[in-house]
Amino acid sequence: MLVAGKRKVVDARQDHEGNISHVRLEGNRNFTDVNKAIEIAKRGGLENAHAVKKKDGGEYLRTNPDGRSGNNLDEMAQD
């Protein structure tokens, strides 16, 4: 179920180095570039993920903690 105006990350893909490169949002058939998803998250548009700033100034997408590992982006990308 979607929270009003918010999307949910339901799948992920990794690049050849093992970094998350794309995510699929609930209701979409195609994957979204992770940088676009980070921008959506920064605007509060993702229900189950948020943007995190790295020490080097870069950013990455992280699912919200809920005690389950199966819905982490790395786990989603393994399926």
Image (tube, helix red, strand yellow):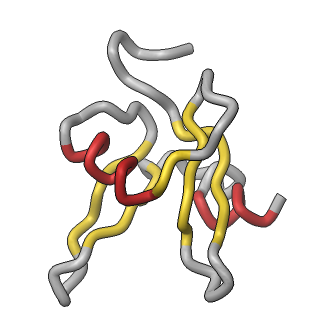
- Image vertical order of residue 66 relative to residue 29, above or below: below
Image spot of residue 79 (x, y percent) = 83, 58
Considering every residue shown, the one lying at the far top of the view is 4
Which corner quadrant holds the N terminus?
top right
Image spot of residue 2 (x, y percent) = 49, 16
- Image vertical order of residue 67 relative to residue 5, above or below: below
- Image vertical order of residue 46 relative to residue 2, above or below: below
Which residue: 55% across, 35% down?
25
20 with respect to 36 (left or right): right
Of residues 72 and 22, the one drawn nearer to the viewer in this rendering: 22
71 with respect to 52 (left or right): right
Image spot of residue 13 (x, y percent) = 66, 61
Of residues 65 and 8, the one drawn nearer to the viewer in this rendering: 8
Which residue: 16% across, 81% down?
57
Of residues 47 and 24, the one drawn nearer to the viewer in this rendering: 24
Q: How many marks?
A: 0
Image spot of residue 15 (x, y percent) = 63, 76
Considering every residue shown, the one lying at the far right of the view is 79
Which residue: 40% across, 15% down?
3
Q: Quadrant of residue 10?
A: top right
Q: Quadrant of residue 26?
A: top right
Which residue: 35% across, 67% down?
60
